[in-house]
Image (cartoon, grey):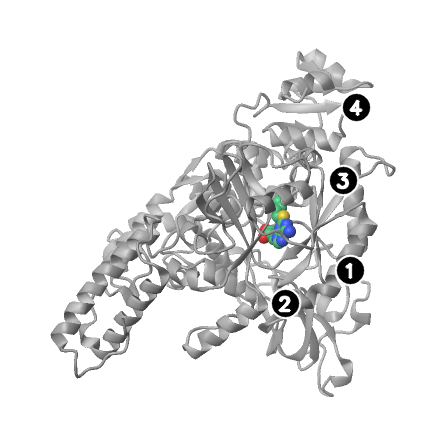
């Protein structure tokens, strides 16, 4: 069929009929493809019909139908993809930047496992592909689900899109009944260039780099678009499994390859840090010729039993690390230094730059960290950049590594304008005029205005409604700014009283610019829906310094309920209290974070705001993950004496992974003491308190590893 129209042969009536037919056929094809995962047209047929439809609409714009297939984005609801909860979390990797970091990584692992220098420990080195990770779930050999990483716990369902990628097999033979294959979706350099040329010719948006192009292509609501994008996939990991793939990482990768997945040919076994670094150097020299982007080398402990023993910190495995390539650099002019005030009051200097391309991305802003950094000092008063300060008008060197905010690395004094003046860091908040103070030991100057500072208040509110926090549909950064400016909302609790306070909230809201009856009704419904919310989200939403998303979830799991959490943090003000010790015993909570939590709850105004908020909510209790059926879930365990089969760190890591709390001291709250040889006062105290005591073997039997 031709998509060209000859107006002399096509009457308005014929066109109208043909458009109706096309709408019916294409909309049905969309449904078959997206919703039922059963395409009834070939790609070529689908594309031809769609082109014909566009051509007819161009020729007869007044005949364009309300249900025009041109405006359809598949049968998936336009608000986005459905969510997928990962059975096994998709974690990220901690980073290493130099050879010493790799030696430290090896040392840490040896210490954790109690291995001496003489004992062999094999690693696998793999290129770190610069794309986006994807998890493919196969059941009985059939691809049943594909999900992006998302926040690591919940990703987006991109099954229809993944099915269009030729590197993703839809059927496997001889695979475990349940197999989740994980790896990286990426785009080659040549495909990226061709795609961008094609996009530019068609007047469509071009992509900044292959990674963005791959992400943009995979996350298309219309899988027909993904199908046309040249995406590729390397497999390098796995999630849920009904049977192990192999005993080692290297053999598991080989098995994935046998099953039909592409695996990276530069994957090598290494005997230790020296060989790992040598392989890194080799890959670094080959980097430009690979034809796709890599941003480093990943090292993994080869033995999968050791990987299991090493386990995970809150967001990263202990058994792997990413050795990143040095960042890309470019020189440009720093036109101006602006100060931004964040939600914790931090005054952050931002360099406004003459736009420059760094590693394929246009950069016009870069962080300058803090006043010491601008002055050429580190946080201990030592020199950085040879003591050179940074001034408005300077030529500066900008770099970016991965997705991080670009930074200013260096300054060229030979190009400094004669009239450039040293930058004077403000001592007063530029947003609210309150004093901006720097506490001893803090690199950052902070506005003391608290919630009276509009910048802090708005940033706190934006954080509160963010994706990992309350995530209220229809209430994003823009709406928060609008409501704050109009004094409808000045603190988080106000969001939940909005409808009531305005009595006729709906009436007022729907008359505002940008709002109608439907969006106003939807907003109030979305707010009501979020009154019932998980504990981890509430803790994160409070925006307390140093308390990030994963720490919030750890805290939630540790304390279980809002009342237990708030009571404990209140009591932890006393550094002698068991509440303080208990808080610090959480793997992933250090003293800085603990202090920050305690401070937030100790400040009357802040605490009152938190209480006002919680009064509006129904905070759900947290469950302990991975501990279903675990005999130690929820129990407080103390280890003492010498452990012979594992190090103390490993014992703690394993116990926590099974849902237990590990504490350093015995108290009435202790459920179980694991005592090795040489146990002293703790064992005595446990006996006095009548606490169950086991030796190491007893403990291993209890947790099913004996
Ligand atoms: S392993 C539990 N191996 O890097 C660890 N990740 O910075 C799972 N990546 O989210 C990751 N190449 O998207 C692993 N050979 C490789 C990788 C790789 C690229 C990505 C992946 C991950 C990110 C972490």
Name the residue tied to disc 2. 406
Marks 4 and 1: CB-CB under 8 Å? no
Pointer 4 or 1: first along the chain: 1
- Is residue 290 visible to the viewer in this orientation of the structure? yes
**In front of the other: 162 or 348:** 162
Pointer 4 or 3: first along the chain: 3
Q: Position of residue 63 (x, y in %)?
A: 18, 73
Pointer 3 or 1: first along the chain: 3
Pointer 2 or 4: first along the chain: 2
Q: Position of residue 530 (x, y in %)?
A: 38, 44
Name the residue tied to disc 4. 644
Q: Give how far apart the Cα atoms at labels 4 and 1 are.
A: 39 Å
Q: Give how far apart the Cα atoms at labels 3 and 2 are.
A: 32 Å
Say which quadrant the C terminus sits in: top right
**In front of the other: 140 or 375:** 140
Pointer 2 or 1: first along the chain: 1
**In front of the other: 584 or 68:** 68
Instruction: Assess disc 4: are there few (<14), some (14-19) or many (≥20) residues with their C-alpha within 10 Å of its C-alpha.
Output: few
């Amino acid at each position: 069929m031709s998509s060209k129209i000859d107006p002399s042969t096509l009457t308005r009536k014929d066109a109208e009929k043909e458009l109706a037919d096309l709408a019916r056929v294409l909309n049905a094809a969309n449904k078959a493809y997206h919703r039922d995962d059963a395409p009834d047209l070939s790609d070529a047929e689908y594309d031809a019909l769609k082109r014909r439809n566009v051509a007819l609409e161009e020729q007869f714009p007044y005949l364009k139908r309300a249900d025009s297939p041109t405006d359809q984005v598949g049968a998936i609801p336009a608000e986005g993809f459905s969510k997928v909860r990962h059975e096994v979390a998709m974690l990220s990797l901690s980073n290493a930047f130099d050879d010493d970091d790799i030696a430290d990584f090896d040392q840490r692992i040896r210490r954790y496992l109690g291995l001496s220098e003489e004992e062999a420990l094999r690693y696998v080195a793999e290129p770190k592909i610069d794309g986006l990770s994807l998890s493919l779930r196969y059941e009985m050999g059939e691809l049943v689900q594909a999900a992006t990483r998302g926040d690591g716990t919940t990703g987006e369902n991109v099954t229809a899109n993944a099915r269009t990628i030729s590197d993703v097999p839809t059927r496997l033979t001889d695979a475990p009944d349940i197999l989740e294959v994980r790896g990286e979706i990426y785009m080659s350099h040549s495909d990226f260039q061709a795609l961008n040329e094609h996009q530019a010719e068609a007047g469509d948006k071009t992509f900044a780099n292959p990674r963005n192009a791959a992400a943009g292509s995979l996350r298309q609501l219309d899988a027909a678009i993904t199908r046309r994008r040249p995406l590729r996939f390397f497999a390098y990991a796995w999630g849920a499994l009904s049977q192990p793939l192999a005993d080692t990482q290297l053999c598991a990768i080989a098995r994935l390859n046998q099953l039909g997945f592409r695996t990276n040919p530069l994957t090598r076994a290494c005997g230790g840090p020296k060989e790992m670094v040598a392989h890194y150097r080799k890959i670094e020299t080959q980097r430009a010729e690979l034809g796709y982007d890599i941003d480093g080398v990943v090292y993994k402990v080869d033995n999968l039993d050791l990987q299991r023993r090493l386990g995970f910190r809150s967001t990263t495995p202990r058994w792997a690390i990413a050795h990143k390539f040095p960042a890309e650099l470019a020189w440009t002019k720093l036109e101006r230094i602006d100060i931004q005030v964040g939600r914790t009051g931090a005054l952050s200097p931002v360099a406004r730059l003459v736009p420059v391309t760094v590693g394929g991305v246009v950069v016009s802003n870069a962080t300058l960290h803090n006043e010491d950094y601008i002055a050429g000092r580190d946080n201990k008063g030592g020199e950085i950049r040879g003591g050179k300060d940074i001034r408005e008008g300077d030529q500066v060197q900008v770099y970016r590594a991965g997705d991080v905010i670009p930074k200013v690395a260096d300054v060229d004094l030979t190009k400094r304008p004669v009239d450039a003046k040293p930058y004077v860091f403000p001592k007063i908040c530029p947003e609210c005029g309150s004093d901006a103070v720097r506490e001893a030991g803090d690199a950052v100057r902070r506005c003391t205005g608290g919630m009276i500072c509009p910048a802090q208040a708005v940033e706190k509110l934006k954080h509160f409604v963010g994706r990992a926090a309350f995530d209220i549909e229809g209430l994003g950064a823009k709406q928060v700014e609008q409501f704050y400016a109009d004094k409808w909302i000045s603190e988080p609790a106000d969001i939940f009283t909005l409808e009531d306070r305005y009595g006729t909230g709906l009436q007022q809201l729907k008359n505002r610019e940008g709002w109608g009856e439907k969006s106003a009704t939807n907003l109030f419904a979305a707010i009501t829906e979020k009154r019932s919310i998980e504990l981890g989200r509430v803790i994160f939403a409070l925006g307390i310094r140093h308390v990030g998303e994963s720490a919030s979830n750890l805290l939630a799991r540790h304390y279980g309920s809002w009342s237990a959490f708030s009571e404990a943090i209140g009591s932890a003000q006393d550094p002698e209290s068991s509440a303080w010790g208990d808080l610090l015993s959480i793997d992933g909570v250090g003293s800085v974070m603990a202090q920050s939590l305690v401070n937030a709850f100790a400040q009357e105004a802040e605490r009152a705001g938190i209480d006002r908020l919680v009064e509006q909510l129904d905070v759900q209790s947290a469950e302990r993950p991975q501990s279903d059926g675990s005999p130690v879930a929820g129990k407080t365990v103390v280890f003492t004496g010498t452990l012979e089969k594992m190090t103390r760190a490993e014992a703690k890591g394993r116990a926590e992974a099974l849902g237990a709390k590990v504490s350093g001291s015995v108290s009435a709250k202790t459920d179980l003491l694991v005592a090795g040889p040489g146990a002293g006062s703790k064992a005595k105290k446990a006996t006095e308190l009548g606490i169950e005591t086991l030796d190491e073997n007893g403990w291993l039997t209890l947790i099913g590893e004996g």
